[in-house]
Amino acid sequence: MANVLFLTLLLFTFFAHAECFYHNGKNSVSIKDGESLSLRSPGKPLEKFEIHDQDGLNTCYANSASTVLKTMLPGHPDISYTHTAVMATTRGHRQNWSGSGQNYIKKEIDPKTKKERELVFADYGYFCEALVGLKNAGGACPKSLSVPESIELWSVDLQQSLFSNLGHYFDKMNEIKNDPTKLESLKKELNLAIEAIRLEESHLVRECEERKSPDLPVYDAVKMLIDDQVTDHLVEQNNCTKAKVEAIQKLLTDDSIIAEDRYLVTPRAEILNKFSLALHQDPQLERDLRAYILDEKQSLSHFAQLPTGLGIVLNNLLEELVPQAEYASQCPGTIPGKSALIKGDPSDFAKNFIYSMKANKGTKCKNILQSYELEKLLGSNKNANSCIEHPNLEMIISGLKPFLDIQAEIASSLIPQLLNPESRFADQMIKVLMPGCLNLSNLIDVSNLSCSSYPFCDPKNDFNDNNSYQGPHNGCMEKTNAKALMRTKSIQAIKEGHAIGVSVCTAFLKEDKKRTHYCKTPLAKNEKYNFHQMTISGYRCEAGKMEYEIINSWGSQCEDNSDIKCQKDEYGNPTGPFWVQEEALLDNSTGINVIKEVSSK
Amino acid sequence: MKKFFLMLILFNANVAFGKNFVIYSFGELKVVFHQVNGEWVNKSCRDENCLALKMARLFKDAPLAPSDLMGGKNPRAIKCKLVMKGKVIIGLDKNRNQQSFCKFSDDSFLK
């Protein structure tokens, strides 16, 4: 009997603690053991979220706010965090940043190193201020319209140098705008530089546009085909892959690169022409391709014969361009008549080819001046019409260089507008970094949203935007109350499909079992907490312990410890997001930030 | 028993030489990365003749002043610039997730 009672008590104890239950006399929240909800799951708002890496920018408030907004807005669009950061700090509560005569770069002395360091205008924003700034700007801007975030970048320090150098540029503009002589001189020299770039680039633009046919764009599809073969070779490195890549070389331009661990390949113009011609040979095939590719609403299932027909065309063309004789001896299993450059079934291969054409329909030429060196302009020609000696111009050009290289056709038309110091400097910043975001019709309405911060300690004189502090004056909330607050707000939001922001100090991300009591535990002299903003995107109860899913903005960086379990890919590599134990997160947080629809209670 | 151990060895060999490569895009350039001593570096980087691996040792041990990390900056990006004297460059993986890398003068990359 005693044993039965003991066993019953043991079972009761086990089940009583198995679920994540909390009650503080006022609120209770309970979730069952094993219950889990993540906004990154299939069908949820963050399923296709692209992880951010803010690198050396202090834009965590904007990274988090833009992530939360993605879950709040209809259709779950990707929101630009660079636009959000600029709006938060120039149109948010600190309106004095946007006036003329103010500094876009501030200098301060590091108290520890005593060295001067530079703060860019977009540093140190606040989560809720970001929403205020976006409302004042007319809405949130889609990520696709932000140059730094949307274009595949090939430039070191691009994000930081763009913000930093543009900040210097606008401060310099502030300085000289009241001196007509200096301003005219700067305008003249910059225009000369722009004209020289335009002349050089115009033939490159023409060349690029000729490659990309507006109706049946083959460039990216052919490139994808070649990229696949080269990737296989770099990864597999066997005789067959080597033979195929050697055979493919004649399809590529002379400046294509295939090295041991990297490649940059460009199909030759005549090869692209052959692909284009092949697509036009069969009238029915061409009709079906045009109908599918040019109409966004068309489904490939309406053209049942298209993949099969195109598969045959592509196979025959590839056999002609890269005959089997060039690689068959190294590739056992080569099927006579089937090009080994086609992986799997030719009709499946053709489907991917068609999808690539559709995805790149109307794609503008980009990155065409990748190797263009402005230094050649600045010093090489001593002709009076093109020699540029203005002391500030080199700084300006170097700051704009990454942007000029990548967006030449847009930059050359926008640069003259940058020389107008009368207009809002923030607007001019937007013109360079994300020109589409100045068009109100491109912005996504956020006027129905409001933001509230729930600090765990009395914010006193800290930035206050709908702060809802519920604890003692000059103190901090009891842990039990703070836990209930975090749990109820998080679970409610996530069940509604919305992420929330959490403000933390970052030591616990690296130091095992770090506890700081809301980032208040006294530190050594001259030590400071590193404050950071992250996003809560899920929750779960595991073995009776509550955990939260966190999205950070440090790329794939994540370290496992007692409190943190990094999410990993199929090879065991961290992908960035992680699960953290509630106790650890709460103890290292200063509060949470929640965005709601105004009509919601 | 011998067959069992043979299978075990073959299995582990397959895992050890399995396809654990990742490709990142930097503009039109694509670079293949692999792991060496737990560090992700470009595939041609195999020993400390390569700056990325040489500097990776500094990376773990060298502390940063708290002021260097203020505002939630990515610690690895800051260490790249201040400790390793490299340059930060952002690549995209196949799902267009951003990832910052430290690039060195010998064209090696460290994630």
Image (cartoon, coloured by chain):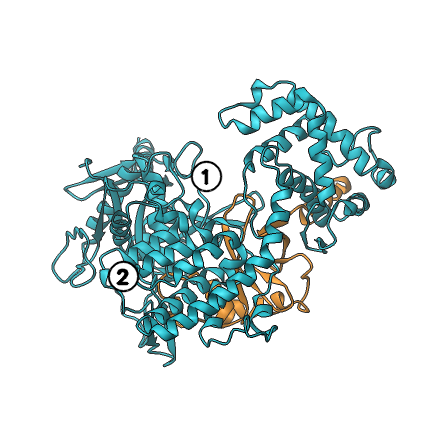
Chain colours: A cyan, B orange
Q: Is A177 placed left or right of A350 in the picture? A: left
- Identity of the residue furthest to the left in this view: A473
Q: Is B83 placed left or right of A126 in the picture? A: right
Answer with mark 1 or mark 2, whichever residue precedes in sequence.
1
Residue A302 rendering spot, x and y as whole percentages: 56, 18
Q: Chain of mark 2?
A: A
Residue A39 rendering spot, x and y as whole percentages: 38, 38
On the same chain, marks 1 and 2? The answer is yes
**Of A44 and A448, which appears nearest the observer?**
A448
Q: Give the number of the disc on residue A98.
A: 2
Residue A545 shows in this picture: no
Give the image quarter of residue A548: top left
Residue A228 rendering spot, x and y as whole percentages: 68, 42
Q: Is A186 placed left or right of A300 in the picture? A: left
- How packed mark 1 is, by other alpha carbons closer than 10 Å (few <14, some 14-19, many 20 or more), is some
Please tell me which residue is depicted at 69% across the width and 28% down the height of the picture. Answer: A280
Q: Chain of mark 1?
A: A
Task: Give how far apart the Cα atoms at labels 1 and 2 are.
Answer: 35 Å
Residue A96 shows in this picture: yes
Q: Is A298 placed left or right of A73 in the picture? A: right
Please tell me which residue is depicted at 87% across the width and 38% down the height of the picture. Answer: A325
The correct choice, above or below, for A427 with respect to A106 in the image is above
Give the image quarter of residue A503: bottom left
Residue A126 rendering spot, x and y as whole percentages: 28, 56
Please tell me which residue is depicted at 62% across the width and 60% down the height of the picture. Answer: A371
Q: Which residue is mark 1?
A: A48
